[in-house]
Image (cartoon, coloured by chain):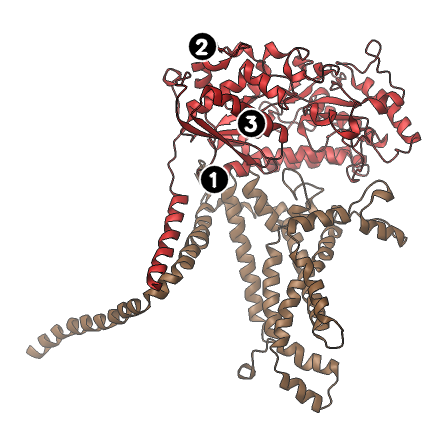
Amino acid sequence: MRKLLAILLTGALALSLLVGCVGEKTPGGNVDPEDINVNLDPNVQAELEIMVPGGNVNERTMIQCLIDSFADLFPNVTIKMSYVSVDNYVSAVGQQQLANTLPDIVWSNSPDFYDLVESETFADLTPYLQANEMAETVYTYRDENNQPSKFSSDDFFAEFFNMGKMEDKSYVIPRSCDTVITFLNTDILSKAGVDLNPETTKVKNGWTWDDFLEVCAKARAWMDKNGMSNNYVIDANLTSWLSVCYPMLLSYGAEVIDTEGNVAIDSEATRQCLEMVATMVKERYINDSTVATTGSYDNGKSAMLFQSASVSLYAERLALKGKVDLVSFPLITVNDTPKIGAGIAGYAINSASQNKELAWAFLTYMLSYTGQQEMALNGLNLASIRQDLSDYTTANWGKGYETLNLSAYTFGSEYKVSTDFFVRTTLSAKAGLQQALQQMFNNASNAEKAKDIDGIIATTVRDMEDAMIEY
Amino acid sequence: MKTTTDAAKAVPALREESSKKQKKPLKKFLKDNYTGWLFNAPLAIGLLLFTLIPVGYSLYISFWRTNGINIWEWRWLDNYIRMFTIDREEMLLVLGNTFYYVVVSVPLGLVVSYLLAVLVNSTIVKHVNAYRVLYYLPCMIPAVASALLWTDMMKYTASAESMGILNQMLLALGLPASRWFQSEGPKAIASLFFINLWGTGSGMILWLSAFKSIDKGLYEAADIEGASRFRKFCSITIPMSTPMIFYNLIMSVIGSIQYTGTLMYSTGALPGRGSDGESLYMLGVKIYNTSFKISGAQGYAAALAWFMLAVIAVLTGILFKTSKWVFYGEDDA
């Protein structure tokens, strides 16, 4: 009996290990668009798995609603969700790829997807887009009447669609347009004497940095007089988010990496930008980076916030109920090159997926009129990637918030810029470059260190050059 | 001639016979013990697959530039050379921080946990079992929860009212508030020494077990001789617990060199790197960052891990060479 038990245990262990280790890998390879079937049999039986960021309730809800509607088109297809943490996203996806357990469809964003393109994790979706365009109608590309329709790349905002591309190949299909905007606490601002009358206010889309500083000064004065001297005027996300600080650098005429792939951060324009940041700290519009803040926009203690998230994320908060409005990111016109940070969140297809065509059908459905409208009803209160849904007063993404200035999300497509400078150098430098830039703004926000702006830039150049030495 | 020929024939025959004799016990051994080996197989297979093969694999990839997936560029010894050339400055910083941590943290942890164990081993203190439990309780808090707690307790803010509890205490005593592990320079790591003191309960348990194994007869003999408590502590307790001191010393040194706890107190794309995080940037953190945050650098991370092993081996070797003070019993005396 003992022997039998031992043999069984050993066998079970060996078998479980083999099952875990053995797996087939399907290379991505080039696919001919003509070989791709974009109109699959509705009775096809299959299973799909989709990976979404687990901490984002909105994302989970909107994808679940897509899954439910997709089931109407393919009743024999089962789709299940799995979750990934955004904090260690690239390594988590990489590990699942190694273990051959990566789902068919994977959430991604700019600029994280660059790493996963380099590791051949994501399939090149260009042939799939071409196949969609070649077809008379695409079964899952549903129009406003929920009927199959003709797919065209012109249906989408090209500047955002291109953010999912690398070397002219599409890897991530955007589910919406993400733009950095300014969230306003209208309660604080109106009490501070800021004119918010739509007819006369300066706080409107296209407002300038000078207008913004004027508002900051008024808010600061009011906050100091009303027991809020320990809170700051704006949650700027300057030191933690390249989508804010990188466009600011560009607006001043600075560059991070030039077209030759060399470090170009050491310039007069960078100095001006950092001095402006230091001044904002001095005036207490933003917090000193060495001091933790207790008050924030979320809890109604800051007058403004730079963010790209859905309006529903803030407008429904107890501390902000009825106090939220939006306006575009203030334009820095000092160099006549104002920029606004933009990016995408969307979905890619695992290059090793056995169900690429079905996964593509799902992504096509996500891009369709019906899919976009359904997601908008379930938490996606961000500008749609579709041009015919740009009007928030009629499209679902503005539903419930029509009285707010949601056009802030779509304002100024000519100013939009993503953090795409990573592709000008070796990809292994990405994390190091990101860290160096964030640290530069962190130091500029440190009252002590900001006394030596040249020193801050020199440290940044050193860190960037270190990061760019290929491993 | 004949004799020579017979002898020549006899030698291989003898060798064959001897070889059979040698094989027979092995066969017999396996036949007699295969049940044991089968029971042992899960552990042996587990060790092979999850320890030995990964160890070998890490040595293999340390000679490559790789992301472990599709990038494989042969680098021979370049990864090992890199840490002393291109990466020299960062390595000096990392090693400086690591050794500072080891040199202070290890003795501090050992002494405090030892004294704590002496205290809770004493019969003078009432309700000693309750103290043992209390001192051990912090060790049961998960590391992440502990990091969150400490981050909150050490919070430094613009206003006194919203400071963390430790800063509130400092302010109440008329002392300036501290940025703790967000400080620059040695002060940041010093905060970790303070945090680590809350984990000394685990060391205390080991010391207690060592104390319990000391022959009571020695103390009785000392009592008859009229030895004081202090004398008994110095002449019996400490010498008799030297094997455990030595064991704890080695394990603490190894654990401290491998320390990655600062990852939990830093944020950003590369926690620990950059001027604000430099004070907490240690060798273990660098290996983690290089492996999981930098694309295509797993080979270099593996080389760094082997370098860490070499450092640990050298330090452990030195400790063993200088371990004459350890008392293993009368035979070794």
Instruction: Classify mark 1: helix, strand or loop.
Output: strand
Do we see residue A168 in this rendering? no
Chain letter of disc 1?
B
Instruction: Classify mark 2: helix, strand or loop.
Output: loop
Evaluate whether label 2 is on the same chain as label 3. yes
| Distance of label 2 from label 3 (alpha carbons) | 25 Å
Chain B pictured colour: brown
Residue A314: percent from left, percent from top: 73, 27
Chain in red on the image: A
**Residue at x-position 71% and y-position 54%:** B192
Do we see residue A301 in this rendering? yes
Which quadrant: the C terminus of chain B? bottom right
Q: Nearer the observer, disc 1 or disc 3? A: 3
In which image quadrant can residue B319 be found?
A: bottom right
Residue A366: percent from left, percent from top: 53, 20
Q: Is residue A168 left or right of residue A24?
A: right
Evaluate whether label 2 is on the same chain as label 1. no
Q: Residues within 10 Å of mark 2 (few under 14, many from 20)?
A: some
Q: Disc number at residue A137? A: 2
Residue placed under numbered mark 3 in the picture: A64
Residue B318: percent from left, percent from top: 57, 66
